[in-house]
Amino acid sequence: MGIFQRSSRAAPTSQASVARQHGIHWPLFASSALLAALSIVIFSLVSSMVAWLLDQKHHVHTYQVDWPGNPTQINVEPKNMWTDQGHESNGLAVYGFFLGIFGMLTAWKMRKADQAPRSLTALTTLLLIGTVFSISAFIFVFVVTYQTTGQRIREPIAINAVGLNYPAEKWTPETWFRAILDLPLADGAQHAQIKSRVKNMEAWRWILLPLLLVYITASYVVVTTWLRQRRNTTVRAGSAGSVEKTGAR
């Protein structure tokens, strides 16, 4: 009789655990889907920027600047240009996309499972790594951007460096082309195109912020789920042990 009493007491706990598990997969699925979507957006914008920079370098070569009395050709890129922030953002986007897909698959497995799949532990570890990666990328991109913000292309230096890449200061693609827009470019169509590209560069930089927030949210959800699963496993193991001891008596 004691065995059946203890079994009936353990059953509601197990059922409640399953019910909670079935409910927690939706936040994990939603945050993972958003992570994958934002990662695709960033990857597309950064890849578009890289393709455009290569096109400018290999096909356009120079811009005509109509300074009063000194019309000058200026190379499309400076001598010292930081591109690491673009590579890091692209890497973060690729990592986030595949991690988002993995998170959605894990959430889907949890939908009908009585206990969390083994992939939940791997997802927890990968999301925590991704969150640290996202924080470092966000800080790095904004630091190098603001370190070079406000710089101007100086006419005497540009005139003396005709045929060479502009030698002064360090730049990011965004701050360099923003400085290009301040010049009296002879080609209005080029000015409009560069302005559009600068907006794209600003866009992917700022999208890193919601991506970081999604990483943090997804990490919170998956860590909470993982800890809850560990507690439920411990409770079930304890209940099973009690039943075995009672049966032995």
Image (cartoon, rainbow, N blue to C red):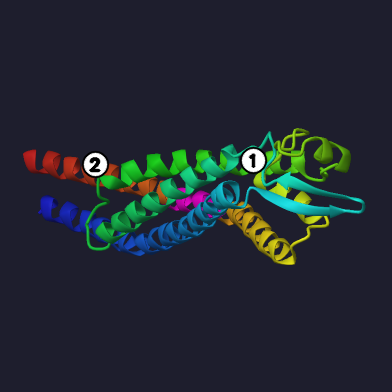
* 23 left or right of 10 in image: right
Q: Which residues are magenta?
A: 211-221
Q: Main secondary structure of the magenta part?
A: helix
Identify which residue, 33 or 97, lies in the foreground: 97
Residue at image mark 2: 238
Q: Residue furthest right?
A: 69
Calculate the distance from the C-alpha at mark 1 to the C-alpha at mark 2: 46 Å
Q: Amino acid at mark 2?
A: Gly
Q: Circle 1 — which element?
A: helix
Image quarter where the N terminus lies is bottom left
* Amino acid bearing label 1: Ile
Verify CB contact (< 8 Å) between mark 1 and mark 2: no
Q: Earlier in the sequence, mark 1 or mark 2?
A: 1
Q: Which mark's residue is nearer the viewer, 1 or 2?
A: 1
Residue 59 among those drawn in magenta: no
Residue that carries the numbered disc 1 in the rendered image: 139
Name which quarter of the figure residue 114 lies in. Answer: bottom left
